[in-house]
Image (tube, helix red, strand yellow):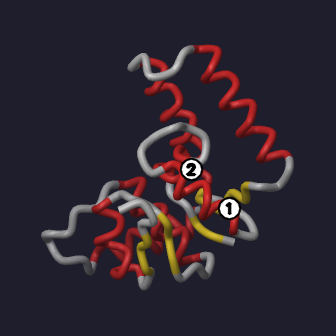
Amino acid sequence: MIYLDAAYIGKCYLNEPGAERVRELAGKSQGLTSCEIGRLEFFSLIHRHRREGNIRAREAKGILEDFEKDEADGVWRWLPVTPQLIRRTCDALRGFPDKVLLRTGDALHLGCARENGFKEVYTNDRHMLATAPLFGLEGIDVIG
């Protein structure tokens, strides 16, 4: 079981740079996991691609149908966002150096991965990769 952030979830379904490597990684794993917010981020990503004209409405519908079929088939395991997760992630942030750049969603992904016993997170988000060690995690980018 591997933990993917939303950028890598998207690459499982969209033909973006690096998608082949992410799909290869996903295909070799025993399952794919992310925080529940990753599901919402994926839907937002599909909406953004539609809005920007990268995919048509019919393509978006097909992508979301494939994604939901994968969910029904047990490919994805969504980890819950709980009050405890939020509190412990907030507590972790208190001790971070001032220069650390970490967005809310990335903090939630890293906190969730740590809370659920993961040692690695897969992403190509440079800020998340740089901050992963502060959560006791190794950030791995199979693209770059």
Residue 59 placement: quadrant: top right
Q: Amino acid at mark 2?
A: Ile
Quarter that holds the N terminus = bottom right
Tag 1, which secondary structure? strand
Is residue 75 toward the left or the right of residue 142 in the image?
right
The answer to whether any part of residue 43 appears in the image is yes
The residue lying at 54 percent from left, 71 percent from top is 113
Q: Is residue 75 left or right of residue 123?
A: right
User: What residue is rendered at 50% in x and 70% in y?
Assistant: 121
Residue type highlighted by circle 1: Leu
In the displayed orientation, state which residue is furthest to the right.
73
With respect to residue 65, does 12 lie above or below? below
Relative image position of residue 32 (x, y in whole percent): 68, 61
Left or right: 68 in relation to 84: right
Q: Which residue is drawn at the image coordinates 36% and 81% (left, top)?
A: 133
Q: Is residue 21 left or right of residue 101?
A: right
Q: Which residue position holds label 2? A: 9
- The first of marks 2 and 1 along the sequence is 2
Q: Nearer the viewer, residue 120 or 21?
A: 21
Q: Where residue 32 is drawn, which disc sits there?
A: 1
Q: CA distance from mark 2 to mark 1?
A: 9 Å
Quarter of the figure with the C terminus: bottom left
Label 2 residue SS? helix
Of the pair 24 and 93, the residue shown nearer to us = 24
Q: Are marks 2 and 1 in contact (CB under 8 Å)?
A: yes
Q: Residue 79: in sight, yes or no?
A: no
Above or below, 111 against 12 in this view is: below
Toward the viewer: 109 or 72?
A: 72
> Residue 106, image x and y in percent?
40, 59
Q: Estimate how packed mark 2 is, as few (under 14), some (14 to 19) or many (20 or more) residues with alpha carbons within 10 Å.
A: many
Residue 73 lies, in percent from the top left, at 86, 50
